[in-house]
Image (cartoon, coloured by chain):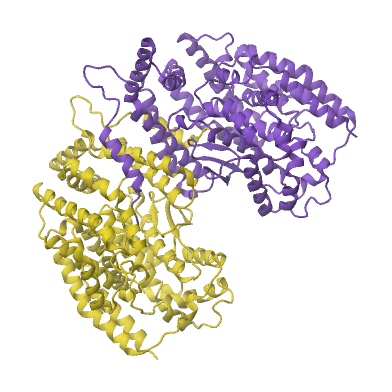
Chain colours: A yellow, B purple
Amino acid sequence: MKKFLSGLAFVFLLTFITSGSGYTNTPGRGYELSDFDVFFDKLIALDQAESILSWEMETGGAPPGAMEARAKVISVLEAERFAMITSDEMRAFFKAVEDAQERGDADEISLAIYRVTKREYDKFMAVPADEYQAFSELTAFAFITWAEARETDNYSLFAPTLQEIIDYQRKIVEYRRQAGMVYANPYDAMLDDYESGMTVAILDEFFDDLRSNIVPLLNSITASGKTIRSDFLEREIPISIQRNVSQLLMHTVGYDLNRGLLKESAHPFTLGIGQSDVRITTRYEDRLFPSFYSVMHESGHAIYEQNVAKRLEGTILDTGTSMGIHESQSRFLENQIGRSFDFWQGIENSFRSTTGTHFNDVTLQQLYEAVNIVTPSLIRIEADELTYSLHIMVRYEIEKEIFNNPAITANDLPALWNQKMQEYLGLTPQTYAEGILQDIHWSYGEFGYFPTYALGNAYAAQILDAMKKDLDVSTAVKALDLSPINGWLAEKIHSHGSLLSPEQILAQFTDEGFSSRYYIDYLKDKYTALYEKQ
Amino acid sequence: MKKFLSGLAFVFLLTFITSGSGYTNTPGRGYELSDFDVFFDKLIALDQAESILSWEMETGGAPPGAMEARAKVISVLEAERFAMITSDEMRAFFKAVEDAQERGDADEISLAIYRVTKREYDKFMAVPADEYQAFSELTAFAFITWAEARETDNYSLFAPTLQEIIDYQRKIVEYRRQAGMVYANPYDAMLDDYESGMTVAILDEFFDDLRSNIVPLLNSITASGKTIRSDFLEREIPISIQRNVSQLLMHTVGYDLNRGLLKESAHPFTLGIGQSDVRITTRYEDRLFPSFYSVMHESGHAIYEQNVAKRLEGTILDTGTSMGIHESQSRFLENQIGRSFDFWQGIENSFRSTTGTHFNDVTLQQLYEAVNIVTPSLIRIEADELTYSLHIMVRYEIEKEIFNNPAITANDLPALWNQKMQEYLGLTPQTYAEGILQDIHWSYGEFGYFPTYALGNAYAAQILDAMKKDLDVSTAVKALDLSPINGWLAEKIHSHGSLLSPEQILAQFTDEGFSSRYYIDYLKDKYTALYEKQ
């Protein structure tokens, strides 16, 4: 048995004991923003502790029997964090920033912390506590019903729960409006939860563009008759080789493994616990390419988190600014870089030496084509680069309908789903499981989340266009030297963490704001070339 | 990117939000003990979070670059825990238990929590805050100086720091006395930190017994001329085989891997995070037997933690009662069981099938003898079962001298050390590194800790004697069915967790209290037989 608490931890401890709870006001003077350092340190410590406790369970680092006890511990920490977010100290912080802003001496970090926390606080406070609790309780368990419904392909099992969730979501929009929040479209209230400032007005234009450009492109590809060789995608590759490929990729793309690591979990994800500790997971199947591209994808998320400016370390701004911008970084590395011919040209030799004889009969061109093959499918998470955003469009339109048409009920959704899948992807699900029941998100009450996936794709193309004006991207990728690319991303995006809003991040590399044009052009150029070539 | 917080955690969260801070008093009524449940839940949550964050770093589960940031987070959690322990709520709890005791309706769990926390609280409060801070700061860094001194074999580098630590330790004893704590011997104040109720009076008698019995026994063994074959102990065994041996042992001894797991770390240790999550580590060398017996040892600690009664789960009593009793459980499994002929007889076949051909030329008798070979050495952690407690005796006598002879200084200690090593083990260190600088404990300010190792050995022998009155231990061990043994230990020791004090635990299986007789007899019987046999 041993006691923990390293020397270093002890020293910090002393600092905290000495400084006490920093937000205690000295009589006779106003709060200073630095008075809240200890408050935010505690908030961050609770958050990081919860993350690590959960990470352990998700990645097999804790004994299976510990689940229940650990869930309780996490909830105790979360309750504490929750109490802090709604505390008098939090309100005192808001007041202090507002005062400083009035005096004209608020620093940019405090202002950004204010922006991020006040937004959450106001949204939370807009909803009566008992409604919030009831909604939380409902969504805490709904995924069980959803899983059972998917398992048994029985939508009617999930429909009543989904209806309840929808009712709550609609009420939340109302409460926010009553609290003075203004939304041009009720669905905007949900979109803003995952991408601040995102609206139906912007997304309608975006998806209209997609619909009128990508659907015809897909149709012409399907009609082209070109066959891409893809048999080798299905080959069974030993996990030990797949692990070596993961290492090769992480090193190649510049994911710093001194401040990161890779583990395995049921679904790949990235966990940022401050810039010095950014972890990713993958899942190894028999086939190589699912883990290949999940490692690329998660490394994109991870590099974003790792390259936040040092001066933001230890603040709540030490993380990406939004879901959409985050997804742009993972997609950029996965697709714009990782599915480019330049990249395959650059990595070919290392790839071959790492995978032994498994792909000896496959040419570089065949590898490139196969990882870009277009195959309309029913399942979003298995979708190729071209059709991915069409899956999101289906979900976006359904969610928009839910918030704009009070008459629509959960029972109407499967028909709506199937009709849109047929229209955009030319496929009709034969089961609920491969249709409306495939995603867990709605059971968590996460409406407004899906569009960030498509936004990420579109941002990524817009980023590539801007980057090419400053850098010879092609030469860097061919040489597998991603440092100028990561440097550019760090300067324009990563280093700002959450200091800047998504809109402000866009302004770092474009004057025209968000535009779908680059994404459409990128897809058209790439897939027209790919499917014309004989 | 994803958000954590499982459904289960959410439900507990709701409970906490609903119940609020449970120790808020309803006007017009006194506190009830259940009012403090939420307070203690939070204390435990902080403690468990700190443990897991540290565990991750020690077992390679966190990126190396995360060290500093993580140390800060741990310190924030520790500061919070510290604030709780010295809070008004803590004092309100003490008052509530005292009131309940007066009314005659205090439950045994609350009384035990009171016993454990009040003891720590009083000791802490006895020392002025600035002195405590200065001491903490000193010992937070002293291990660095110690490590450098050991590395360069330069005692004079560490001596001034050690002197400072000794000065503080002596002052702490004084402060405690001023606060009304009564010690027959000043060193008792330190001993009590690691084994409540332990005193110089008890230990003097114990070590006198050891000195007059074990030293002559060792001398006669050294003089016996019997040679035990031990060449095969040094054989290089592949780590994969060593891992399989670890699995074999953990399964054999009844360590529940649904609520536990094994990882690797620089020094083996056990971490109990409540009975549903008890982890151990080992370290694999080229040789097999260091990891073999470290797994046995740590499994002994782990089984103790796992077998605490279910009703104590989620309380601070859900852990072993003292360092000495804990060490008795690890030593019992390692030595009384794991180094017995019965055990080797029982495990021989599985051992041979797990280790392939590596020990084909070694007989059962030779295996048994080799793992019990007596070789006086300079290094405590490499000591055999017979000489181990002699190493502790050297440290005990020096620590006792420090607290009873104000004239003694850090500069006097190496000579004292070497003289005692020569007297008890017949060896004189040629360097400080293999002498007085070998252990880290004093640099942490941990005086009074070493004796618990020897106490553990002695308790283990006393336990074996008591157990044999109730059980046919030999038959169970030969059959490798440890369930009756674990059942007995659970009933008498494990299930009580920290509900009972070390003295009360002893009373569960003996009427005579602690006695060194069983340990002396055990060693005499075992080693006389071993070294007489030809």
Relative height, residue B120 to residue A326 (above, below): above
Drawn side of residue A155 relative to residue B288, left or right? left
* Residue A107 screen position, x and y as percent: 22, 45
What is the total number of numbered labels drawn onto the structure image?
A: 0
Drawn side of residue A196 relative to residue B284, left or right? left
Q: Quadrant of the C terminus of chain B?
A: top right
Res. B517 visible in picture: yes
Q: Quadrant of the N terminus of chain B?
A: bottom left
Please give the name of the residue rendered at 69% of the width and 40% of the height, measured from the top-left corner. Answer: B480
Please give the name of the residue rendered at 10% of the width and 46% of the height, measured from the top-left corner. Answer: A179
* Residue B335 screen position, x and y as percent: 71, 33
**Residue in the foreground of this view, choosing between B491 and A350:** B491
Res. B426 visible in picture: no
* Residue B195 screen position, x and y as percent: 57, 21
Relative height, residue A377 to residue B345 (above, below): below
* Residue B188 screen position, x and y as percent: 58, 14
Please give the name of the residue rendered at 24% of the width and 44% of the height, measured from the top-left corner. Answer: A110
**Residue in the foreground of this view, choosing between A437 and A58:** A437
Please give the name of the residue rendered at 37% of the width and 56% of the height, measured from the top-left corner. Answer: A307
Drawn side of residue A210 relative to residue B109, left or right? left
